[in-house]
Amino acid sequence: MTAWLRSQGYAVNRKRVTRLMQQMGIEAIYTKPQLSQAAEGHAIYPYLLRGVKIERVNHVWSTDITYIRLQQGFIYLVAVIDWFSRYVLSWALSITLDGSFCLEALEHALRGGRPEIFNTDQGAQFTSRAFTERLSRGGIQISMDGRGRALDNVFVERLWRTVKYEEVYLREYNTVREAQQGLGRYFGFYNDERLHQALGYRTPTAVYRGLGQRCP
């Protein structure tokens, strides 16, 4: 697309074309990573959050995986988020979909607290024995999205949209190290500086830590 526009006399670069295509919802047809593949024999848990009102921190945490496109290939990003405050408790990157990076993010999050309910999709990384047993040992109720119901995990879906539009699509990482550094800076900004209208124009950190007052 960039080459064609240049041939028509438009002075554009790849980053600008990528950004405009994202804004217009236009994308090339190509094979995308399959992130939520079920695994035969893994236990599936019911969805516990339908109709539940989230009114406090550490009531519900959830996690999900998304992919980050590099100049060549993909890497995978997992994050754990507190639903009430939108606070990103932990995140990790991996060059494969092996479940160890998801368990790493879970362990890191649990060092700072514990939710009553933990929600995931039905992907093999989250239905694995290692992952579910770690939650069960902590006395945490396990909830899983219904198949094909992305909105069951809506706060993580909103997080991915925010991260990609405010960071990933603007940076176009070339290497894993660039992605690690860029996302590290962004999640610091997201938690500590980015005001959320739904949080009374407070930051996720302020709400999660119980700091400050709502803005008028």
Image (cartoon, rainbow, N blue to C red):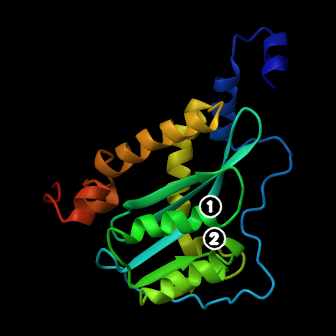
* Residue 99, placed above or below residue 130: above
Q: Residue 43: where, in percent of width, then height?
A: 68, 90
Q: Gap between marks 1 and 2, in whole Å?
A: 12 Å
| Relative side of 33 to 186, left or right | right
Asked where in the image residue 98 lies, by quadrant, the reply is bottom right
Residue density around tag 1, few if under 14, some if 14–19, many if 20 or more, within 10 Å: many
Mark 1 lies on residue: 65
The reply to whether residue 118 is visible in this rendering is yes
Q: Is residue 183 above or below residue 161?
A: above
State which quarter of the image contains the C terminus: bottom left
Residue 133: image x %, image y %?
A: 55, 86
Residue 202 locus on image (x, y percent): 25, 55
Query: Foreground residue, 25 or 109?
Result: 109
Would residue 189 be found to the left or right of residue 71 on screen?
Answer: left
Which numbered marker is on residue 200? none
Q: Residue at x 44, y 84 (%)?
A: 117
Residue at image position (66%, 39%) is: 22
For mark 2, what is the residue? 150
Of residues 54 and 79, the one nearer the viewer is 79
Crowding near the residue tagged with mark 2, few <14, some 14–19, many ≥20 C-alpha atoms within 10 Å: few
Q: Quadrant of the N terminus?
A: top right
Name which of mark 1 and mark 2 comes first in the sequence: 1
**At numbered mark 2, what does the secondary structure look like: helix, strand or loop?**
helix
What element does badge 1 sit on? strand
**Which quarter of the picture shows residue 147?**
bottom right
Q: Residue at x 69, y 49 (%)?
A: 95
Q: Decide if residue 88 is on the left or right side of residue 147.
A: left
Q: Is residue 155 visible?
A: no
Three-letter residue code for mark 1: Ile
Amino acid, disc 2 = Ala
Q: What residue is drawn where x is 78% and y is 88%?
A: 41
